[in-house]
Amino acid sequence: MITLKKAALILLFGTQIILIILGYFSNTKYFCWVPYDQISLYSIEVSVGNHLLSEEEISARYRRPATGRENRNIENLIAIIQQYESTYGKSQLARVRLTYQTNGKDLRTWELTP
Amino acid sequence: MGTNTLTSTIGARVLVLGLFGFGFVPELLRNDLPFLPFIGFLDIIPSRIFELCVRLLLITSALGLLFNIRLKTSSLLLGLTILGSILACKPLYSTSITLISCMLILIGIGHNGLLLRLQLSIVYFGAGLNKLLDHDWWSGSYFNFFATEIFHLPFYQSIEQLLPGHLTFAKILGITTICIELALAVLFLIRRSGNIPMLLGILFHGFMLVWTRGELSVIYFYVMSIIYLMIYLNENQRKNNLENAFVIWNYQGIKSIRLTYEHTVYLSFALYIGISKAPKIYNLINCFTFENPTTWFPVNT
């Protein structure tokens, strides 16, 4: 018989295993136990209209430093920017440019335009 | 007090100290929530109500744990509150904090050595599998970048130059990491493996921490050490009261309950690293254990 305790344990462990499997098919790597799976050095530039946001403004916008190091998948950072710009910042029509270097490979750029 | 309750008490309290000492709780209280939640509907909840609920739950459950009031309920509540806060704020996500919340939930549900081993096995399986499927870990790109551009690891370049081929040492390090993590995932499932996975784990995390001069994920090492300790306490039923359990951090205590030399080394080392990197934890543990922390390490013996 499945008791409440057993059900809770199945839920706790089962969810983790499902999220690990889903993580393989997803670009973002949340909740799948992958710290330091890749390292990226990055820089974010944001402009709203003609105003180029300062590092402090970018940091306040995404709660992430404007320039820094991402110890998890860079897609996690992209997901944060995308979510912000499609929700809270939607009306501002911001242009975002993320420049990053992952695992020492060539510099890459990801852009978001309104 | 039974062993299970004892390990719950120790584990939950030290995890809570970690949450405060490593700055997660202050960060949580500083931020407006919800903010970019993982689950969309959380955004509907007014910020003021959400924050009030989080603060109330956080304070009451943390106090409950520290003063041993409804230990399991407090632990479950705290774990769910932390997890709920992370779900309500994507930028707050951290693997080690998520692991702490899972551990608190597990303590709340009711754990034993086997369940703790299962939790660790899942964690190492996730970490190992992801690396196994990532080309950069096999090609040496990841470790070369890690060692030269990020952490500037001592001796790395010298060893790399000694070996033939391109990024040979980086490849060895990457493949070794994958093997160790997957081996830990398997070993933790085998109860007869005894303390071997714990020793392998502490050597693995400890080695990386020392090599990066304490820069690489101190909190992860701290959390893992606590879980290893909980497994050890669960599977070694020598201790029968809270006082004895707390002196596990004390050299005299370690001698008296006949822990092995390896455990002495890794527990002292784990706590030393944790304390040296987080003075707040030092102060908090000092408050709640009522011990003189200077006696914890066999410095002059």
Image: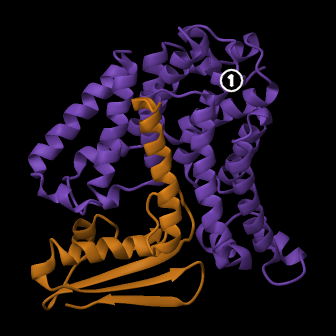
Chain colours: A orange, B purple
Q: Position of residue B87 (x, y in %)?
A: 31, 54
Q: Position of residue B37 (x, y in %)?
A: 26, 60
Q: Residue at x 68, y 23 (%)?
A: B235
Q: Amino acid at mark 1?
A: Glu
Along the line of sight, which residue is nearer the eye, B130 or A4? Answer: A4
Q: Residue at x 44, y 18 (%)?
A: B288
Question: In the image, A50: left or right of B75?
Answer: left
SS for dot 1 = helix
Question: In the image, B44: left or right of B64?
Answer: left
The C terminus of chain B, quarter of image: top right
Q: Position of residue A88 (x, y in %)?
A: 15, 71
Q: Which chain letter goes with mark 1?
A: B
Residue A61 vertical position relative to residue B11 in the rendered view, above or below = below
Along the line of sight, which residue is nearer the eye, A106 or B241? Answer: B241
Residue B30 vertical position relative to residue B278 in the rendered view, above or below = below
Residue at which label 1 appears: B235
Q: Residue at x 67, y 35 (%)?
A: B269
Question: In the image, B232: left or right of B49?
Answer: right
